[in-house]
Image (tube, rainbow, N blue to C red):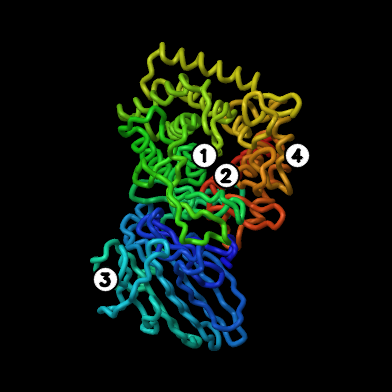
């Protein structure tokens, strides 16, 4: 059975990602991009490829990221001794905001003997193209080169590994003071030569220095600083550096319900996440990254298309066609089927995206000025679209596939688009007559939501107009400024969501949801409570979520409230975005309290 999702740690080179378990096995790696076909996918099927280094006898393990890096150290203790395994993806040359631009698409692993003697098993079993291809390793100068399938791998480093059964294996006893180092480099194409062998020890030092050079320029000094700094590093690792796009997660098909069919591919970038992600990057002192993300988003969403609506998600280089397909040869994580690549949500209509983009522009307004004519026209068109379509139905923020409705959060975000459009009128070049129309529609949206979004029976604003079903997304009403958090009805809504949707601080998305607590919904609740002046309650919710982080500070999409297990795609950018923004709201609430 696959390891628990929370047992994995993230390795990244700002191009792609790998997941390594507490047992020393890399069970997921896609290269050269986040959404590329996998070389290791044991995460989704026992036979779909892995690379393990671990003691061959019973052990205990402790893990930690080296400070201010995404370089992982796992210390294995046995009765006979102690070894330390260091894992990373090579960042390549570059410092500060340039890290990852020239990454060589390589995994590096170094294992050191610290105490006594420890027998080790090393087992490298690539299975290319999502497990369909079993490559062969052949000797070449400097190491071994794989043949077979659409990708090339070059294995280099110490000589203990020998080709075996479509991979390479070794059994070795590592004594104190001795070390082994390996690199596995990926290149596309059957005819690729695999590049030059990597000096693992030098590459490791360069990678550590590169991460720390980036972290040194991003100093957050507010509430929960340790968790915010780690979350900022996670967001950087989930950034596709050539364009600035931030993927929702580096994985596909990790289930929202284990054994169920809600298994989606999250290796793409959503406009829905834009405003909250940009705010998180801004809070975490990453203004350059925030600006690059906005530039990518504006370029991707404003490029030529015959679609009437703005597309809600894109590939990391702006690809539009993300057509979904299933991989029936993979068993799925703990038999959660189907396994999907691609995501048909790209076809959906979601009216909230107008507000997401305009809120992002509002957050970055000082850095964006002056706007190019194209970007200004694009933003004006989005505000116009919000004014014209807010009365219509859409698929909603949660991307349900059961049909469109009048979702409240979509109306609220249309109001955000109109409100920010009015405020940004001069920057985006909107004339007086247009601004007056936007202002009228802004008032109409507000009045409609206040009238038709409130349920006296429930005692809260609900998920859709004239509905009695709660939805945690209405907390965005306070977070976006649609209503003050201390407005009487907003306060009742916050209290009702906490009472009806939260269990031990973990908030489900909607009434009757059978899934676990959705992490960002819990952080939204903490955020709204802090804004309403309920600092103690906000801190309690925040603490309940971070208590469920894994041992290296990572969060998935959801938390199973009964077991506390992390579930869903992992690590989830939106969860870490929610953490940063909630921490900032708590920090601001603390400051207000101190001033009083």
Image location (x, y in percent) of residue 214: 42, 55
Judging by the rendered image, the residue that carries numbered circle 4 is: 499
Q: Give the crowd class for mark 4: few <14, some 14-19, many >=20 residues within 10 Å.
A: few
Q: How far apart are marks 3 and 2 (CA)?
A: 41 Å
- Mark 2 lies on a secondary structure that is helix
Assess whether mark 4 and mark 3 are in contact (beta carbons under 8 angstroms). Answer: no
Judging by the rendered image, the residue that carries numbered circle 3 is: 196
Image location (x, y in percent) of residue 178: 45, 85
Q: In the rendered image, which quarter is residue 450 located in? A: top right
Assess whether mark 1 and mark 3 are in contact (beta carbons under 8 angstroms). Answer: no
Q: Which of marks 1 and 4 is nearer the N terminus?
A: 1
Q: How far apart are marks 1 and 4 (CA)?
A: 25 Å
Give the label, 1 or 4, closer to the camera.
Answer: 4
Image location (x, y in percent) of residue 208: 42, 65
Q: Is residue 349 left or right of residue 97?
A: right
Looking at the rendered image, the quarter that the C terminus falls into is top right
**Who is closer to the viewer here, 140 or 393?**
393
Q: In percent of the image, x 54 and y 67: which residue is there?
A: 21
Q: In percent of the image, x 74 and y 39: which residue is there?
A: 500
Judging by the rendered image, the residue that carries numbered circle 1 is: 276
């Amino acid at each position: 059975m696959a390891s628990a999702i929370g047992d994995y740690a993230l390795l990244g080179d700002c191009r792609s990602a790998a997941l390594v378990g507490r047992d020393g096995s890399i069970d997921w790696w896609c290269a050269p991009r986040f959404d590329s076909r996998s070389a290791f996918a044991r995460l989704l099927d026992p036979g779909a490829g892995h690379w393990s280094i671990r003691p061959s006898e019973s052990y205990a393990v402790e893990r930690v990221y080296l400070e201010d890096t995404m370089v992982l150290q796992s210390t294995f203790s046995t009765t006979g001794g102690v070894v330390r395994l260091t894992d990373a993806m090579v960042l390549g040359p570059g410092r500060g905001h340039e890290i990852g631009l020239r990454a060589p698409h390589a995994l590096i692993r170094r294992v050191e003997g610290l105490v006594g003697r420890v027998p080790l098993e090393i087992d490298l079993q690539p299975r290319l193209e999502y497990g369909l291809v079993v490559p062969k390793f052949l000797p070449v100068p400097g190491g071994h080169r794989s043949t077979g399938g659409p990708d090339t791998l070059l294995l280099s480093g110490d000589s203990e590994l020998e080709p075996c059964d479509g991979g390479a294996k070794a059994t070795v006893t590592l004594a104190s003071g001795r070390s082994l180092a390996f690199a596995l480099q990926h290149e596309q194409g059957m005819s690729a030569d695999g590049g030059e062998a990597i000096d693992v020890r030098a590459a490791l030092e360069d990678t550590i220095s590169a991460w720390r050079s980036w972290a040194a320029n991003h100093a957050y000094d507010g509430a929960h600083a340790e968790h915010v700094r780690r979350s900022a590093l996670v967001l950087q690792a989930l950034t596709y550096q050539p364009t600035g796009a931030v993927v929702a997660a580096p994985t596909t098909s990790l289930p929202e319900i284990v054994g169920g069919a809600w298994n989606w591919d999250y290796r793409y970038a959503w406009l829905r996440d834009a405003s909250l992600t940009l705010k998180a990057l801004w809070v975490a002192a990453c203004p350059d990254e925030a600006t690059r993300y906005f530039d990518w988003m504006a370029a991707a969403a404003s490029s030529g298309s015959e679609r009437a609506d703005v597309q809600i998600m894109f590939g990391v280089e702006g690809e539009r066609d993300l057509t979904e397909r299933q991989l029936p040869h993979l068993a799925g994580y703990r038999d959660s089927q189907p396994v999907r690549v691609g995501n048909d949500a790209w076809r959906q209509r979601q009216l909230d995206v107008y507000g997401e983009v305009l809120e992002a522009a509002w957050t970055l307004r000082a850095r964006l000025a002056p706007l190019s004519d194209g970007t200004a026209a694009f933003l004006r068109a989005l505000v116009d679209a919000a004014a014209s379509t807010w009365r219509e139905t859409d698929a909603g923020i949660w991307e349900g596939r059961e049909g469109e409705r009048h979702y409240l959060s979509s109306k609220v975000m249309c109001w955000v688009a109109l409100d920010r459009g009015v405020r940004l009128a001069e920057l985006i070049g909107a004339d007086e007559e247009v601004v007056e129309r936007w202002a009228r529609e802004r008032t109409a949206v507000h009045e409609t939501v206040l009238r038709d979004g409130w349920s006296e029976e429930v005692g809260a604003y609900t998920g859709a107009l004239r509905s009695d079903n709660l939805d945690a997304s209405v907390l965005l009403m306070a977070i976006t400024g649609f209503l003050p958090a201390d407005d009487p009805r907003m306060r009742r809504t916050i209290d009702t969501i906490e009472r009806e949707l939260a269990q031990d601080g973990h908030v489900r998305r909607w009434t009757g949801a059978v899934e676990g607590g959705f992490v960002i919904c819990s952080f939204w609740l903490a955020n709204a409570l802090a804004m309403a002046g309920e600092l103690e309650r906000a801190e309690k919710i925040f603490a309940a979520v971070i208590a469920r982080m894994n041992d290296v500070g990572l969060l998935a999409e959801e938390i199973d409230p009964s077991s506390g297990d992390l579930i869903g795609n992992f690590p989830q950018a939106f969860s870490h975005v929610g953490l940063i923004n909630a921490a900032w709201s708590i920090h601001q609430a603390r400051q207000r309290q101190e001033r009083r």
